[in-house]
Amino acid sequence: MKNRLLFLGPPGAGKGTQASLICKEKGLLHLSTGDLLREEVSLGTQLGKEAELIMNKGELVSDQIVLSIVEKKLSKSSQGWLLDGFPRNLMQVELLEKLLKDIHQPIQTVLLIEIDDETLTHRMLSRGRKDDKEDVIRNRLKVYRDKTSPLVNHYMDLGILKSINGCGNIEDVNNRIKEALN
Ligand code: B4P
């Protein structure tokens, strides 16, 4: 299996859930920008304070903040990695491509988790995180459509995109992902 992966999909699609399973199984570094930002928030750092205000509105945190977090982690990894929730717009794609070129570690496969808005909204409301409120979720879906979904065409044009259906239970989705990555 390839060991430099990117999981793409709308908020609540299960990127984090599935990325954890795949990373545990394959020994990859799990790099979730959402988790890393939430860690900064819980530590009460200056960066965390700035990020929290933006995350609670469902907007994207600044590209430079996110890149600096990713850069630190990626440069330490030797066993392969899975990017979860990053990049989220075309500027982040550009910044990431430059970074990966510098360390000679191009992405091998981008996996798109596809799922309908109703299921996403239901999952996020059941999770009940601070940014899982109905109006914030609506905005996060809009931000995904406006800023993140153009990445699908970008990676399709590069010939490295695979997509799977994200509906169904965690195990079924996991099996679909493993099949797609084989
Ligand atoms: P993220 O932390 O990336 O979170 P997410 O997109 O909401 O969730 P994910 O798709 O990982 O779903 P999960 O597995 O948790 O982003 C949060 C915020 O951080 C963003 O809005 C933004 O502000 C900021 N941010 C992050 N990255 C950024 C970047 N690169 N640039 C700028 N800002 C950035 O699953 C959702 C729920 O569904 C869970 O409760 C899970 O248990 C459940 N679930 C999963 N799979 C299921 C299944 N098959 N069946 C039933 N339930 C399931």
Image (tube, grey):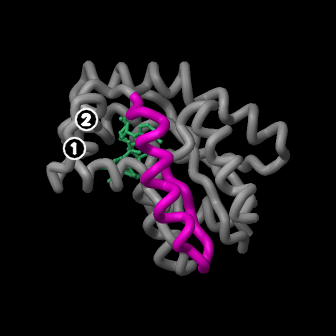
- Whether pointer 2 and pointer 1 mark residues with C-beta atoms closer than 8 Å, the reply is yes
Kindly tell me whether residue 180 is visible in this rendering.
Answer: no
Which quadrant is home to the N terminus? bottom right
Q: Amino acid at mark 1?
A: Gln
Please give the range of residues in magenta: 60-85
Per the image, the residue denoted by label 1 is 46
- In the image, what residue type sits under mark 2? Glu
Provide residue 74's location: percent of width, then percent of height: 54, 64
Mark 1 element type: helix
Horizontal and vertical percent position of residue 123: 32, 41
Task: Answer whether residue 62 is magenta in the image.
Answer: yes
Name the residue: 72% across, 70% down.
2
Is residue 80 visible in this depiction of the protein? yes
Does residue 52 lie above or below 172 as drawn? Answer: above
Residue under label 2, please give it: 50
Name the quarter showing ligand 1.
top left
Task: Give the quadrant of residue 102.
Answer: bottom right
